[in-house]
């Protein structure tokens, strides 16, 4: 939180590079090979685990669709990912970076899944799946390498947290506060405002983390709002000429309320609120785009009427 407050996007970028290196070394060069070695290698893993562990569709198509709704749509419009794309020097770098980051994410997910499968063999009766990685590290690693692995875990958390903190504070300070309340502030004052917003968002995030505890549940809630409330307005804004900023704003507000109410009624891990939110978002952005057309759109419609 504090290096994000002090250094902004530059500090996030620099620390991301260091954290990326630590994550890669810790997971791919240390934890993955040592986990496989501890259980007797890949062949032993194949022999000792049920075949369903190696079947990509074993969780069922309903769950696959659930995760697609939850994470894929949310990732597409996630501002902390876009901010990294927009810091690229050229469009080619942005495009290549996005592709390589996606491929790396797949490899990282597979590596962690294999480590988890090794954990099933080592700790067959573990109660909390969130503790598998930590228990595996304590069980199989000597102290020096254990420190590296813990650093890699912290790096994964920090690289996500810093970008998300900065994304949230930027939205609040630049898109809301500066636009409507502090329009004439100087650059120095705006930097101070941004830092104050980063601190405030960080404190709120800490409170929510202590309250929710479960990482997966927290992700479910966050991505339910992204997928259910943000995805449709962003996509309509890009591809539907009649969509307006005001309609997008009302659509986000309405669908966010629908998603939150749905989560309260259906449970925090339910995906039905996402579907409700997407439906409400489509209906509201279409209605409000027709009710409040933009000035340019009004002129275009009047020109068409004049021609007719």
Image (tube, rainbow, N blue to C red):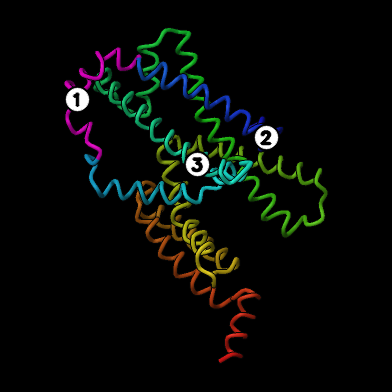
Q: Nearer the viewer, mark 3 or mark 2?
A: 3
Q: Earlier in the sequence, mark 1 or mark 3?
A: 1
How far is mark 3 from mark 2, CA to CA?
19 Å
Which of these two is toward me, 181 or 71?
Answer: 71
SS class of the residue under badge 3? Answer: helix
In percent of width and height, residue 210 lies at 50, 34
Image vertical order of residue 55 relative to residue 258, above or below: above
In percent of width and height, residue 37 lies at 30, 13
> Overall secondary structure of the magenta stretch?
helix
Q: Quadrant of the N terminus?
A: top right
Image vertical order of residue 17 relative to residue 243, above or below: above
For the record, the magenta segment spans 34-56
Q: Nearer the viewer, mark 2 or mark 1?
A: 2
Q: Quadrant of the C terminus?
A: bottom right
Which of these two is toward me, 30 or 221?
Answer: 30
SS class of the residue under badge 2? Answer: helix
Q: Quadrant of residue 39?
A: top left
What residue is disc 3 on? Answer: 98
Which of these two is toward me, 215 or 234?
Answer: 234
Q: Earlier in the sequence, mark 2 or mark 1?
A: 2
What residue is disc 1 on? Answer: 49
At 25% from the left edge and 19% from the top edge, which residue is drawn?
42
**Tag 2–tag 1 contact (CB < 8 Å):** no
How far is mark 1 from mark 3, CA to CA?
35 Å
| Mark 1 crowd level (few <14, some 14–19, many ≥20, 10 Å Cα) | some
| Mark 2 crowd level (few <14, some 14–19, many ≥20, 10 Å Cα) | few
Compared across the picture, whether 54 is left or right of 98 comes to left
At 37% from the left edge and 25% from the top edge, which residue is drawn?
131
Residue 10's disc is 2
């Amino acid at each position: 939180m504090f290096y994000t407050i002090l250094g902004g996007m530059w500090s996030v970028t620099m620390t991301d590079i260091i954290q990326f290196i630590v994550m890669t070394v810790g997971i791919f060069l240390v934890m993955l090979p040592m986990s496989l070695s501890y259980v007797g290698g890949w062949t032993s893993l194949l022999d000792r685990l049920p075949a369903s562990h190696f079947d990509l569709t074993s969780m069922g198509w309903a769950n696959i669709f659930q995760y697609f709704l939850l994470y894929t749509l949310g990732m597409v419009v996630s501002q902390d990912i876009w901010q990294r794309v927009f810091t690229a020097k050229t469009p080619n770098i942005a495009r290549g970076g996005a592709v390589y980051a996606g491929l790396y994410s797949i490899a990282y997910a597979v590596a962690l899944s294999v480590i988890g499968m090794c954990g099933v063999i080592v700790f067959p009766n573990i109660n909390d799946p969130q503790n598998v990685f930590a228990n595996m590290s304590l069980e199989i690693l000597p102290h020096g390498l254990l420190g590296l692995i813990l650093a890699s875990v912290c790096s994964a958390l920090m690289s996500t947290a810093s970008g998300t903190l900065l994304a949230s504070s930027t939205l609040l300070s630049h898109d809301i506060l500066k636009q409507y309340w502090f329009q004439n502030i100087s650059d120095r004052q705006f930097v101070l405002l941004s830092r104050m917003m980063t601190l405030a968002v960080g404190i709120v995030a800490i409170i929510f983390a202590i309250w929710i505890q479960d990482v997966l549940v927290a992700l479910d809630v966050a991505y339910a709002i992204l997928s259910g409330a943000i995805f449709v307005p962003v996509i309509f804004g890009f591809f539907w000429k009649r969509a307006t900023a005001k309609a997008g704003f009302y659509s986000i507000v309405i669908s966010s309320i629908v998603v939150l109410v749905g989560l309260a009624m259906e449970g925090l891990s339910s995906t039905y609120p996402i579907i409700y939110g997407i439906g409400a978002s489509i209906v509201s952005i279409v209605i409000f785009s027709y009710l409040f057309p933009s000035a340019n759109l009004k002129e275009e419609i009047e020109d068409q009427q004049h021609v007719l």
